[in-house]
Image (tube, rainbow, N blue to C red):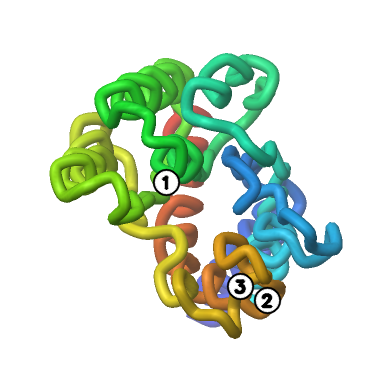
Amino acid sequence: MAIVNLWLAVGFWAAMAAEKADPIRMVAFGDSLTAGYMLKPSEAFPVKLAEALAAKGHAVEIANAGVSGDTTAAGLQRFDWAIPEGTEAVIVELGANDALRGIDPGETRKNLDAILTKLRARNIDVLLAGMMAPKNWGKDYEERFATIYSDLAAKHGALLYPFFLDGVALDAKLNLQDGLHPTAPGVDVIVKGILPQVEELIGRARERRGAASKS
């Protein structure tokens, strides 16, 4: 029995070592909220998220593919070079600039649908981060925009974090003077909120990797 337990322990630690040696390759694909507008590079969302995951024992490499000012259309245009070969998981954070500019929610839906279709075709696991439209465009616009993310997450089997700025939006203490972009403490709040879904995303990516290695 002692020998069996020893081999089980050896196998467990070998698996843990292999996981740490071969991190999940993730891309944070978004706009200025991902890029870290007016923040130090070390304060940007992908960096803070990677640190939080490392503290919980997850081996993950997160590329910052955030571009300030990007709409969903711009994200779709740069998709092929923004999501390199070997990517296993993607956090999609796009749509805030569409809403700020009053772009037809039908266009936003179409662009995000195309992005998620491309990711699914490449067998990349996805966490879709939702956005909310400002109220100045009217109730009809707000309602049409609000259903985009939940509908597309269900359609594509993606994980959903309903509102990327949950706990941060409209809080002056957690936003820059423009009232739109989070401060470093604001990014910390975002990371804390989204972390459980990102851990689930990592789990999915590892399961997919394991299944691929057995096939």
Task: Quickly name the residue at label 3.
Answer: 175
Cβ–Cβ under 8 Å for marks 1 and 3: no
> Spatial distance from mark 1 to mark 2, Cα to Cα?
21 Å
Q: Residues within 10 Å of mark 1 (few under 14, many from 20)?
A: many
Labels 1 and 3: the sequence-earlier one? 1
Taking the spot 48% from the left edge, 58% from the top edge, the residue there is 198
Cβ–Cβ under 8 Å for marks 2 and 3: no
Give SS at disc 2: helix
> Spatial distance from mark 1 to mark 3, Cα to Cα?
24 Å
Above or below 196: residue 31: above
Labels 1 and 2: the sequence-earlier one? 2
Above or below 208: residue 1: below
Front residue of this view, candidates 89 and 206: 89
Labels 2 and 3: the sequence-earlier one? 2
Which of the two marks, 2 or 3, is nearer to us in this view?
Answer: 3
Task: Quickly name the residue at label 1.
Answer: 127
Any part of residue 215 in sight: no
- Mark carried by residue 146: none
The disc labelled 1 sits on which kind of residue?
Leu
The disc labelled 2 sits on which kind of residue?
Ala
> Spatial distance from mark 2 to mark 3, Cα to Cα?
25 Å
Q: For residue 69, which quarter of the picture? A: top right
- The x, y position of residue 206, in whole percent, is 50, 46
Task: Quickly name the residue at label 2.
Answer: 55
Q: For residue 80, which quarter of the picture? A: top right
Residue 23 placement, left or right of 106: right
Taking the spot 85% from the left edge, 63% from the top edge, the residue there is 40
Which of the two marks, 1 or 3, is nearer to us in this view?
Answer: 3
